[in-house]
Amino acid sequence: MAVVAVEHRHGVAVLWMQRAPVNALGADLRAELSLALSRANDDPTVLGVVFASALSAFSAGADIKEFGKPPTSPTLRDLIEQMDASAKPLVAAVGGIALGGGFEIALACDARVVTPAANLGLPEVKIGLLPGAGGTQRLPRLIEPAKALAFIATGSPVAGEVAVPDGLADRLADPDCLIDAAVNEVKQFASHPRRKLAMAKTNADSRSAFEQAATTLLKRQPDEPQIEAIVDCVRATYDQTFEDGMKLEREHFTRLMADNRSKSLRYAFFAERSVGQLPATTMAQAETVKSVGIIGGGTMGSGIAMAFASAGIPVVLIETDPDAAQRAVDRIAANYTHSVNRGSISEEMRARNVGMIAPAVDYRELGNVDLVIEAAFEEMEIKREIFGKLVASTKPTAILATNTSYLSVDDIAAASGASGRVIGMHFFSPANIMKLVEVVRGAETSADAVATVLKAARGLGKVPVVVGNCHGFVGNRILARRSEQVDRLLLEGATPEQVDLALTKFGSKLGPCAMGDLAGLDISWRMRRATGRSAPVADALVEAGRLGQKSRKGYYLYGEDGRTPSVDPEALALIESVSRSRGIERRVIPQEEIIDRMILPMINEGARILEEGIADSAKDIDVIWLHGYGFPRWRGGPMFYGQTRGLFDVVARLKALAEATGDVSMRPTSLLESLAASGEAFS
Ligand code: T1G
């Protein structure tokens, strides 16, 4: 037995699961648990069985790496049916996370003994599924179905100390006596028959509470097949037998598993864990960042300072003068106060975090920091001037990072005199919240610098993705292609509302016009001016003083609160006048064309980025768009969406659109053409 160790303790067989790293219930673990359970039942000296873990996790559930492959016996269901058939009592001893099938194993036991640090959850909904090993049938028979519905539909775990009063677990034990407590629990059952699943509650109050919860849930999350399936299965615990309910659960599970939505969510789960990985030998060279210096206390600099301070890393925050530096710290302190008021951090934590940030003006204050992050104004000359001073002010091992969102890291590095230490760390606003960091590798950036920055970003709980140096790197470069199409669509006849509706129908929370108004139309306008590019409609709006929410009008008109958008006839008239001035006869553009002209050029640009080696893989691009730009997670990312739709169809549609609109930028790249022709996917 490699992944299960059996210990006999006071006549009870303790099955210690030990399948690194999280006891995912893969074929080997299932087989060994089944064998051990069978042996325990055959052994007359054994009173009962305890399921325990030798790892910090109890079990992370089914091995999602096995999904989509032919099932191997015993399946998780086979194992749980074997548990149901056990003549001897079974108790789960949970000292860590017990998620999905891991919690379903515990639910199939007669009792659950947990430590305060245990974490019980059914997160299948987050990967487009529902519990598929009896969770939808056992939990509603253990606690109120309305509560079980909420628990399964949110997928959020509960800690052991909450699970006991909530009825999900039976007993709380200290970690060092968890197993003995579980062994004693087994002995309680030895003298009377095992607890069989009671029929569901049948009283009217319970049912009406459930139906009310179901109605609210379906209204809040419409058109989500996994939510509908969960409601259907939990409702079955009122009307159907356990066996029939299990059949219904299995049908829903099998259907959802094959659905592209779940495939995309599972892809996203693994993609975000696999990005930013360098060879172990390189990662071994990573230094630990114990203190940082941040140049610039504006929105980005303050957000980055908060990200480090919240992780317990001291920050020297440099501004141009003492008042500006103090104002930046005061703004940060106010942000932390909001967090305290929201209950997300304690007052002590607020005080600790604010105390981590030292305002300064003199670059010599950077003498001991391990990492400097420049977050000054997006002007190349300003950045070059700053990097010209950093080498003299910092220790020779300090890494010098720029937070630029699109300027050349190589040009900035050239001003430093130490290009090997210069790297890009492109955070996304608000930097203390958004997980994505584009780690921009300059031509001369050292491997140690990349490894150290990846380690530091992970330490902040960020999702770092390594990208190459080019205008806009990966995320903003792809965003630029979509923005160009938005402007063309508006010129040719679409309205801001139609464009935004198309993208929200595609699954994004916010359309590009509303997003532009939120961010400020003048920001991208300045960027276009700096790089000699134009966007006729967006330029005209800015030049007419329509900057977005900040000026109460942009693509839309904003009410008193400055945030509620409404269609503005003046904006539509302005857009129509721009079309007329360019001799464009406006037309009604079908929603499907609007969606394709925004999304397919993103896939095309992603393919160009792969051809140029700016991104190492399609999943890097997808993770950037999932975590930096709100691409709908249930589509996996732009590249995975293209793959799911079919690259042959993507290429054909791009060709047709290029032909119909005369826009040569729509022509598919050679990589897309070759993948479509060969039927291969992005590697
Ligand atoms: N299957 C396979 N591998 C898994 C896994 C899983 N369920 N969970 C984690 N891993 C791997 C992960 O890929 C990484 O691998 C390593 O473990 C550490 O993970 C029938 C159908 C458990 C909270 O949804 O939420 O049961 O990169 O980096 O931050 O009803 O992983 O090292 O090679 O995330 O400490 C339901 C998913 C499955 C839990 C740990 N279970 N996992 O977080 O480490 S469906 C889940 C997580 C199911 C049943 C249904 C987290 C974690 P590598 P990590 P972490």
Image: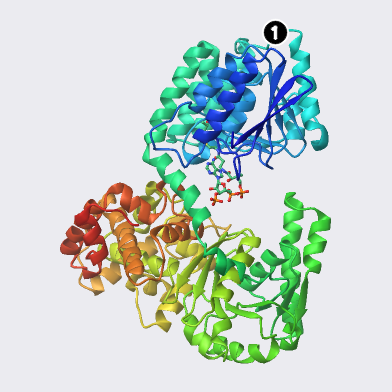
Few, some or many residues within 10 Å of mark 1 (<14, 14–19, 20+): few
Location of residue 349 (image quadrant) = bottom right
Left or right: residue 174 compared with residue 602: right
- Furthest residue to the left? 659
Q: Can residue 396 be seen by looking at this rendering?
A: yes
- Location of ligand 1 given as a quarter of the image: top right
Q: Is residue 35 depicted above or below 432 in this figure?
A: above
Total label count? 1
Left or right: residue 171 compared with residue 384: right
Q: Is residue 101 depicted above or below 612 in this figure?
A: above
Residue hosting label 1: 193
Report the coloring of the rendering.
Answer: rainbow
Q: Can residue 546 be seen by looking at this rendering?
A: no
Q: Amino acid at mark 1?
A: Pro
The x and y percentages for residue 295 are 65, 80
Residue at x 73% of width, y 57% of height: 338
The x and y percentages for residue 431 are 61, 65
- Furthest residue to the top? 192
The x and y percentages for residue 128 are 46, 38
Location of residue 57 (image quadrant) = top right
The residue nearer to you, when weighing 163 against 3, is 3
Placement of the N terminus among the 4 image quadrants: top right
Ligand 1 within 8 angstroms of badge 1 C-beta: no
Q: Is residue 556 depicted above or below 181 in this figure?
A: below
Element assignment for label 1: loop
Left or right: residue 300 compared with residue 486: right
Residue at x 45% of width, y 35% of height: 222
The x and y percentages for residue 499 are 35, 56
Placement of the C terminus among the 4 image quadrants: bottom left
